[in-house]
Each structure stands twice: as C-alpha cells, then as structure tokens.
Image (tube, grey):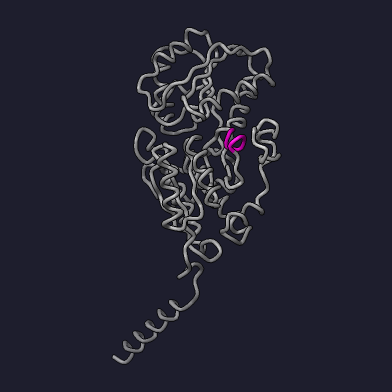
C-alpha cells in the first residue's frame, strides 16, 4: 500500500512539474489569421483543398512551438468568390478578432479587394493563388505578398513551350473576369516577343460556373485553331475539356491548371498531350518536397487526399513563406514585415504597371 501511495505521489509530482515547464506558445496570445476562399458553390472544391494545406501548415507550425513563441489561430470563412463578401468578412475579422493577416488563393477580383482592405487596415494580405498581373501592377500595395505565379509568368511559360513548336494558330478561351482577361493579354504579349509570326484566330470569354460551353468550343473548332489557351480552373476546367473532347476538338490545350487531380481523374484520356504550368507539383524532385509528401501521407488528414496535390501544397508553402517572414521580422506588425521582405523583382516592368508605387 505504501509503495502504491509513493508511486502515486511521484507520478502526481512529475505531472505537476511537466505542467510548470515553459512550453513554446503556452498561454501566449495567439497570432490571428483569416483565410477567405470559396467553401460553397461551384468552386467549393477549390477552397476545400486550399484549406487542407493551410490546416496542415498551421498544425506543423504550432507543433514546432508556434511563431515568436505564440500559437497561430486561423479563422476560415467563405468568400463565395465575391469581392464584397470577402472584404466585409475580412474587415469584421480585423475589427472584432484583431486578425493581423488575411489570405486567399482564389479570384483576382477578390485579391484586389482584399489588398485594399489590407492597406487600409495595415495588415498583411497573403496571396497564394490570385494570379492577375494587375495585383502587382496597377493595383499594387506593399501590404500584399504574392507567393503564386502571376499571369505573366504562367502565360510566359506556356508561350515559351509553344513558341518552340510548329503550331501557328491559337484561340484564347477564358473565364470572363479580371483573371481570364489577364491570362489572354499576358499570352499575347509573350507570344509577340517569342514567336512574332503566330496567329490569333480567336478570343472569347465565358461566365464562371457555366454548365454548357459548347457554343464557345464550337467557335474554337471553326476557327481552325491548332492550340487553345485557357486559364480555366475547378469545375469550369472540367466542363471545358470534357465538352471539347465530346465535340471533337483536335487542338492542343495549353492550360494553367491541368495539374488539378480532380480534373485529370474526371476527364481522363482527353488530357493526354496537353500542357500545364503551376508553382507546385508533386513531381518536384527535391528532398524538401519528398519529406513534405511523406509527412502528409503519415498524417492522413483527409482520406480523399492521400497526397498533397496541387492546391494543398500550394497553400501550405504559402503559409510557410509567411511564417518565415514573421520570424525574420521578429514581429507581427505589417510595416515591420514589409521592410524585411525584398520587393518582387522583374515580374512586371515598372513602366507597365500603371502604379508609380510598384518599383522594380
């Protein structure tokens, strides 16, 4: 009985001692962040996958002691891919929850609006997916960090590939909002530099979330285009490629987002031979990426996503970029962080930005 009592007392004291040992982030005020992405509607799968990557990043950051000795607390909300909805919610989180960082990956128009909120409120906007050139051009704000490819970069990569091929005739088909128009303009500029004898045989834009793209695809077919360039993503991309195949489109496809595993699985063989460009792919052959994939597989965060494909990896690396910026600044103050991260160089020449504050 005495031995048992002694063991009980020692165990209790050991537990108390452990509780008293300082632990990184324990009891500290959390660093608050808010992610705004579509988690309803036709683009819900985009927001859901972005959110998985963010959750994994936050989980790893907090398991390692947080940032500056403080845990990260992330709020998740639905942007509905609508600028007014995103800005209203972002402003509320900043005012009511003292959020210091807002982020999104979907919608150049949403990114523009959140950049304005960030500048007005003096918080950081982490953009890990909104690609329109205007965000680091005429709508530039030093309170936005874009850690995704811009349309100049993605269209430029596609143009570099096709400029070395014999194809001459191109049709540009994109979603009818800021991003889709930026995709087309960037591709035209890049091809003009790389392959001056290329021919633009057609250009058109369709509404987001359209169920029937046959009229647009028919235009592509009748134009005689050898290549169709598109920045479509999510459900729009799947509808476009599936219906194009059913209608007999023979043109090669140059796509921003055919790295999407949902699209590849649903569409199947019609994607073979098409070209895609993205900032994160599972096939990146580096020790860091291999280790990241193994950690994801071991964690088993979502049975529907055994691998951290596309948006998961893209959002994860975006949040980790922000974490390193906070560590480097040794502060969560936006103005402190801005001073330690050098401006993006050369993405858009200063004379083309339309904004005098955007410096090369």
Expressed as whole percent of the image width and height from the top left, the position of residue 11 reads 38, 82
Please tell me in which quadrant of the rendered image residue 132 appears: top right
Q: Residue at x 63, y 27 (%)?
A: 156
Q: Nearer the viewer, residue 203 or 54?
A: 203
Whether residue 300 is visible to the viewer of this picture, yes or no, is: no
Please tell me which residue lies in front, 116 or 131.
Answer: 116
Dividing the image into 4 quarters, which one contains the C terminus?
top right
Residue 132 in view here: yes
Left or right for 176, reference 321: left
Q: Residue 277 appears at what percent x and percent y?
A: 56, 31
Left or right: 351, with 301 as reference point: right
Q: Which residues are magenta?
A: 134-139
In the image, residue 226 above or below residue 41: above
Quadrant of the image containing the N terminus:
bottom left
Front residue of 136 and 156: 136
Measured as percent of width and height from the top left, residue 346 is found at: 69, 36
| Picture layout, residue 18 above or below residue 354 | below
Residue 135, given in percent of the width and then of the height, sits at 57, 37
Which residue is found at the position 62% from the left and 35% from the top? 137
């Amino acid at each position: 009985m005495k031995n048992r009592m002694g063991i009980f007392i020692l165990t209790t004291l050991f537990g108390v001692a452990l509780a008293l040992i300082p632990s990184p982030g324990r009891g500290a005020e959390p660093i608050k962040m808010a992610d705004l992405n579509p988690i309803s509607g036709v683009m819900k799968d985009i927001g859901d996958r972005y959110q998985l990557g963010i959750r994994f990043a936050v989980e790893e950051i907090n398991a390692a002691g947080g940032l500056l000795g403080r845990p990260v607390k992330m709020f998740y909300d639905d942007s509905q891919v609508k600028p007014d909805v995103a800005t209203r919610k972002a402003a509320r989180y900043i005012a009511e929850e003292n959020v210091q960082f807002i982020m999104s990956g979907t919608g150049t128009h949403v990114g523009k609006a959140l950049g304005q909120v960030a500048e007005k409120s003096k918080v950081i906007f982490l953009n890990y997916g909104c690609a329109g050139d205007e965000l680091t051009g005429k709508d530039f704000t030093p309170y936005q960090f874009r850690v995704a490819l811009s349309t100049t970069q993605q269209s430029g990569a596609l143009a570099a590939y096709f400029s070395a091929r014999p194809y001459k005739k191109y049709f540009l088909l994109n979603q009818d909002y800021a991003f889709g128009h930026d995709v087309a303009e960037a591709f035209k500029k890049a091809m003009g530099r790389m392959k001056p004898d290329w021919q633009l045989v057609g250009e058109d834009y369709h509404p987001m979330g359209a169920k029937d793209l046959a009229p647009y695809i028919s235009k592509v077919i009748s134009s005689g285009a050898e290549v169709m360039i598109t920045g479509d993503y999510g459900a729009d991309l799947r509808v476009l490629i599936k219906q194009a195949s059913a209608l007999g489109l023979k043109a090669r496809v140059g796509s921003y987002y055919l790295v999407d595993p949902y699209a590849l699985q649903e569409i199947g063989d019609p994607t073979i031979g098409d070209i895609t460009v993205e900032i994160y792919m599972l096939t990146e052959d580096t020790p860091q990426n291999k280790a990241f994939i193994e950690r994801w597989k071991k964690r088993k965060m979502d049975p529907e996503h055994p691998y951290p494909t596309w948006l998961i990896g893209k959002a994860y690396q975006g949040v980790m970029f922000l974490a390193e910026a906070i560590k480097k600044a040794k502060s969560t103050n936006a103005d402190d962080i801005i001073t330690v991260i050098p401006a993006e160089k050369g993405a858009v020449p200063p004379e083309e930005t339309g904004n005098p504050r955007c410096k090369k």
